[in-house]
Image (cartoon, grey):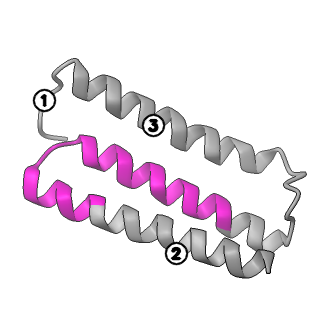
Amino acid sequence: MFLFLSGVVMAGCFVAATFFVRYRRRSGDRFFVFFAIAFALLGLERLGLAVRNAPEEPHTGMYFLRLAAFVLIIIAILDKNRGGSRDV
């Protein structure tokens, strides 16, 4: 059951990343680039957990991918609120 749910979450993260890339192409806003990379990192983290078959997440290395994704989301929000430029 863990592998199935990890696959569902991983697929959802990659689908979200794809949508953010599409929105970036339409709007030209780098906010969506940060979110696409963050969701791709979350998908990779879930893939790594599924490959290791570790539902209790004992591997601290996987937390760094999650941390990097959340830091990117915070950077995107701060960049958007300070009025950053629209191009990458």
In the rendered view of the protein, which quadrant contains the N terminus?
Answer: bottom right
As shown in the figure, which amino acid type bears the numbered disc 2? Ala
Asked if labels 1 and 2 touch by Cβ distance under 8 angstroms, the answer is no
**Distance (Cα) linking label 2 and label 3:** 20 Å
56 or 71: which is nearer to us? 56
Asked if labels 3 and 1 touch by Cβ distance under 8 angstroms, the answer is no
87 sits left or right of 60 in the view? left
70 sits left or right of 6 in the view? left
Residue 14: say if magenta: no
**Distance (Cα) linking label 2 and label 1:** 31 Å
The mark total stands at 3
The image quadrant that residue 16 belongs to is bottom left
Q: Position of residue 33 (x, y in %)?
A: 29, 49
30 or 5: which is nearer to us? 5
In the rendered view of the protein, which quadrant contains the C terminus?
Answer: top left
Tag on residue 85? 1
Front: mark 2 or 1: 2
